[in-house]
Amino acid sequence: MSTPSESTAMRDRFCGTLRTSDVGTRLAVCGWVAKRREHGEHLAFVDLRDHTGLIQCVIDGAVDVHSEFVLRVTGTVTVRPEGTLNPHLGTGEVELADCVVEVLATAETPPLSIGGRVESDEQVRLKWRFLDLRQDRMQKNLRLRARINSAIRAAFDRQGFCEVETPLLWAPTPEGAREFVIPSRHFPGSFYVLPQSPQLAKQLLMVAGFDRYYQIARCMRDEDLRADRQYEFTQLDVEASFVTQEDVFGFVTEAVLDAAEAATGERPGPIERLTWFECLDRFGTDKPDLRFGMELVDLTEQFAATEARALRAPTVKAMRVPGGADLARARLDAMTERAKQLGAGGLAWFRVTESGLDSPLLKFLSDEEAVAVARVDDAVPGDLVLAVADVHAVACRALGALRVALGSPPVAQGPHRYCWVTEFPLFEGLGADGAPLSAHHPFTMPHPDDLDRLESDPLSVRSQSYDLVLNGWELGSGSVRIHRGDIQRRVFSVLRMTDEEAEQRFGFLLGAFRYGAPPHAGFAFGIDRLAAIFAGEENIREVIAFPKTQSGADLMTGAPTPIAASQLAEVGIEVRPSPT
C-alpha cells in the first residue's frame, strides 16, 4: 500500500522502500538505471535507483537501456529466488517482476562514476556537480542538512521567535572580514555590499520591537577558503530582547540538541561550559575538542629555578601523549619546528621508560624536576611528555596545536561534545596606533565586573561574548549587546573612535538607539559546519549543494567570468588590465 508521501501521478513507491510486505502488489517506480545485467538473450536485470535506494527489476525481452537512463517501471513485487538474496540491500529480499518499462529520458555515459564504485577526483566531482549529487553520499548529506534546518526552525518557532528575512544588498559593516562589493546602476560610483551577517539589521529589529528574531541566513565573506570556510555560508541567526546571556544559552541549546537528535537519533547530554581562560590553560585553544584527553599541565612552579635554559620562562606547560614514546626523532624534530612557527622558543620532549626519562634535556634537570615531568597526567612507560616554556598564551597555543595534531579523532568519530566558551577578552590586542582592537565588534557589552578597568587596563576587560564549540569546530558566536549610550561612548573612546567617525560608520544604528533600545543579546552559528560534523565530513563542501573550489572557482558554471563591456558601462565600471 503506497503512502501519500511517495505516491504521485507517475509512481506509486520509492525504489528503496519495497519490502516483503509488498509482495503481490503491482506498482510503478521511477528512477535512474544504476546497473544493467544480461541473463541470456531475452532476460535482463536492471537496478533502478532513486534517493531511497535500489530495486532490482526483472525485465523479459530485449530492452535498450543503459546507465543513468531515466525509467518508469511497472511491475509486481515478488520474493527473490533462493540463493539470490542480498543482505546488504534494504530491498535485498524482493524484486520487481513482469516489468513494463517506459524510457523517460536517455543519458550519455557520465564523466564520473555514480554509485560509489570508484572515487572520482574532486575537480571532476565539482565540474559535474549535478551528477555528483546523485551519489548516495551526497543525497544523504543534503537530506541530513534539511532535517537539521527543519529541527532548528521548529525549535525557535516553539520558543516564540519570529523568522524575518533581512536584506542581501546592504551597507558596509564593521565586522572586519572583506566584503563582496556590488555596484549600483542607479547610483554611479556607489556600491552595496553583500552582508557578512545580519548583525546590524537584527539589532535594528530589536529596536523595532521584534523581541525574538531568528533567520536561517545566507552570508558572504570575501576571504580565503579552507575546509570549514566558503565564500557563501549559511548561519542560524538569533537575537532577543529583555534577555541575559543565560537566556540565549537556553534558546540555542534547545535548538542544537534538537538538531543533533534529528540528525543522529540520539539527544546529547547537557552542554559543558568553560571560560576562555580555562580553555586556553587546559587545551591551548578557545575551541577545544573534548572527545579526548591530553590536557595541558602547568609545571611553572616546579621549574621556577631550573638550570635547563630551554625551560626558563614565565610559564611552563606540559602534555602527555599516550604511547608517544615510539615517535621517531624526525617526527619530534618536525613538532619542534611547528612549535617555533607558532611563536614558541622551542619544544622539550621526554620519553617515559621503565627506567625513567629519556631526553636530551635530562642531564639539566634536577631530580624533583624529572619526577614532575614523569608524573604529568599520570604518565606511564611508553608515553611521551612534551613541554613548552614561554609566556602563558604562547606556551598554551603552541602545545594546544600539537595536542590537536597528535590526538584529535576524525570528524566521523563520536561522541558529539558541545562546549560553551564564555568571558572572551573584550579587546584582542593593540593596533599600530596603540589603540585596542575589538575582539568581536564594538557593540559587545563588557563584563559588569570589569567596567571600572575599561579605560585604565582595557586588555584585561572581559566581554559578555560567548562561542559554541562542537568537537573542536567553532560553530558560532554571540554576545550581549551594548544598548546604553554612556557605555557605548566609553568603548568608542577606548577604541579612539571620534564621534564623527562613529556617526559615519554606525550612524543609522546609533540613531535608532536614541529612540529606545531594549537590552538585547544574540547568537549565530554555522549550519554548514554543524551538518558536516553530523555527516562525518572533514570539509563543508560535502554538505553544500554547489560549493566553490579552494581557489574560489565554480567549476560547473565557470564562475567567476568576465562581464560584457555594456554591462560594466551601465554601472560606470572600467576594468583595467592586470599588472604583469
Image (spheres, rainbow, N blue to C red):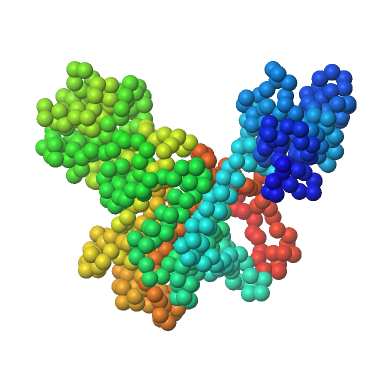
The structure residue drawn at horizontal position 72% and vertical position 43%, both measured from the top left corner, is 2
Percent across and percent down for residue 522 are 42, 63
In this view, the residue farthest toward the bottom is: 515
Give the image quarter of residue 429: bottom left
**Residue 558 visible in image:** no
Percent across and percent down for residue 430 are 31, 59
235 relative to 520, above or below? above
**Residue nearest the observer in this picture, 87 or 322:** 87
**Residue 154 visible in image:** yes
The structure residue drawn at horizontal position 58% and vertical position 50%, both measured from the top left corner, is 146
The structure residue drawn at horizontal position 70% and vertical position 58%, both measured from the top left corner, is 563
Viewport quadrant of the N terminus: top right
255 relative to 313, above or below? below
In this rendering, position of residue 341 left or right of residue 142:
left
**Residue nearest the observer in this picture, 432 or 312:** 312
452 relative to 416, above or below? below
Percent across and percent down for residue 70 are 79, 39
Q: How many marks?
A: 0
Percent across and percent down for residue 209 are 46, 75
In this rendering, position of residue 494 left or right of residue 215:
left
**Residue nearest the observer in this picture, 11 or 435:** 11
Give the image quarter of residue 163: bottom right
The structure residue drawn at horizontal position 49% and vertical position 65%, both measured from the top left corner, is 161
